[in-house]
Amino acid sequence: MRGKPQLVSIFESPFLGVNGWIKRVEDVVLGSDILIVIAIPMLLIAVTIMLTSKGSVLFRQRRYCLFGKQFEIFKFRTMTTSDEDDCVQQACKNDPRITKFGAFLRRTSLDKLPRFFLVITGVMSIVGPRPHAVAHNEQYRALIQGFMLRHKVKPGITGWAQVNGWRGETGTVEKMRKRVEFDLSYIRNWTFFSDLKIILMTVFAADTRKNAR
């Protein structure tokens, strides 16, 4: 992902035109295939959540997507209902709000599987900057230059920052700044093959589970 220096346009998404079509075909084809494979595992996860803790199967939250618009993201619930419904406090290591099964889902990223439905509908992409809670977005956009440039592309289930260890809790401005740095590098240097590399690293590289919460 380290190519010659380039600028991210402040006016338009880099995925317009041909690149946009390539990106969308990638999401629809790979996303559909993945949904077929994960259908039964998702059903088993949903049943296990219902049997092991009280509350809804899915956790929903408002976040930002392409061009700074808001959307409702969802994932399998990993925390106690009372703590996770509207709370924007980031999960941290040994967080008491996380259920035992939820800890497993977070560690393996299986809690994110329902988001492939958002990929198929075009709200998210398989690869892209991970979306943050609205409150976190408003906090960091005032502290980090170029923060909102992440929204020149669709948010992703996985991303260049995540496979390089910048996932999970961002307890300091510097940690968030590093995440943004990798996100903007992804946008500047995107290719179809870089997406495939990130997907493979997400699945097979142990380092991608670093900082999982």
Image (cartoon, rainbow, N blue to C red):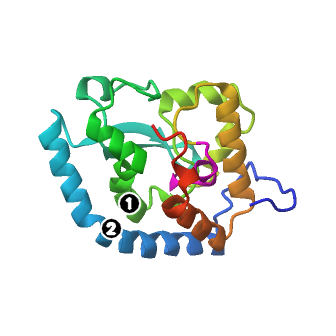
* Residue shown at 28% from the left, 36% from the top: 100
Point out the residue furthest to the right here: 4
Element type where label 2 sits in the image: helix
Image spot of residue 90 (x, y percent): 47, 28
Residue 184: x percent and y percent?
Answer: 71, 49
Helix, strand or loop for disc 1: helix
On the image, which quarter does residue 50 sit in? top left
Residues in magenta, as a range: 156-166
Q: Is 63 in front, or is 104?
A: 104
Q: Amino acid at mark 1?
A: Phe
Q: Is residue 78 magenta?
A: no
Q: Quadrant of residue 210?
A: top right
Type of amino acid under label 2: Leu
Q: Is residue 147 left or right of residue 50?
A: right
Q: Going from the N terminus, do you reach mark 1 or mark 2 first?
A: 2
Instruction: Give the residue at the far front of this rendering.
Output: 206
- In the rendered image, which residue does mark 2 sit on? 35
- For residue 212, above or below residue 116: above
Look at the picture and state if 150 lies above or below 154: above
> Contact (CB < 8 A) between labels 1 and 2?
yes
Q: Cα distance, mark 1 to mark 2?
A: 7 Å
Crowd class of label 2 (few under 14; some 14 to 19; many from 20; radius 10 Å): some
Residue that badge 1 annotates: 116
On the image, which quarter does residue 54 sit in? top left
